[in-house]
Image (cartoon, rainbow, N blue to C red):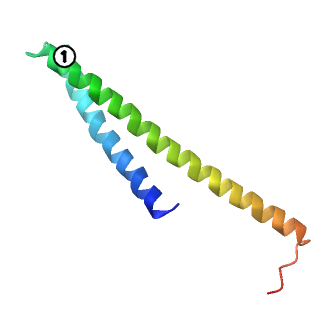
Amino acid sequence: MRPRALVLFWGATTASVLLLGTVWTLAKQLAGGAARPTEDAALLAVAGVGLAVCLLVAGRIALVAGRLRRDARRRERVDDHRLGGREAAG
């Protein structure tokens, strides 16, 4: 995986963990009868959407990286088959 994709993946993963903690805390506050239920509900909605987006970004990066790795292996096998199992002279 390219360095930029690694940074994006781990950044999205870290943001997901932080937002999960926020969602968890706000949900507990709302369930316990928060003093500001409207504000907490709005923050919970924003944090929930942010969590979903971060998880989708990290999942998409992992999916594309896996697909690229699989395609590279497939191309190697096709190239080896074309060479008849012999190594290319070079």
Position of residue 62 measured from the top left corner of the image (x, y, whole percent): 52, 48
Residue 28, compared with residue 17, is above or below; it is above
- Amino acid type shown at disc 1: Leu
Q: Which residue is drawn at 83% across and 79% down?
A: 87
Q: Which residue is drawn at 25% across and 35% down?
A: 21
- The quadrant holding residue 55 is top left
Q: What element carries label 1?
A: helix
Position of residue 51 measured from the top left corner of the image (x, y, whole percent): 35, 33
Foreground residue, 3 or 85?
Answer: 3
- Farthest right residue in view: 84
Residue 71, compared with residue 51, is above or below; it is below
Seen in the image, is 72 located left or right of residue 10? right
- Residue for badge 1: 30
Q: Which residue is drawn at 22% across and 20% down?
A: 42
Mark 1: give few (<14), some (14-19) or many (20+) Cα within 10 Å.
some
- Farthest left residue in view: 35
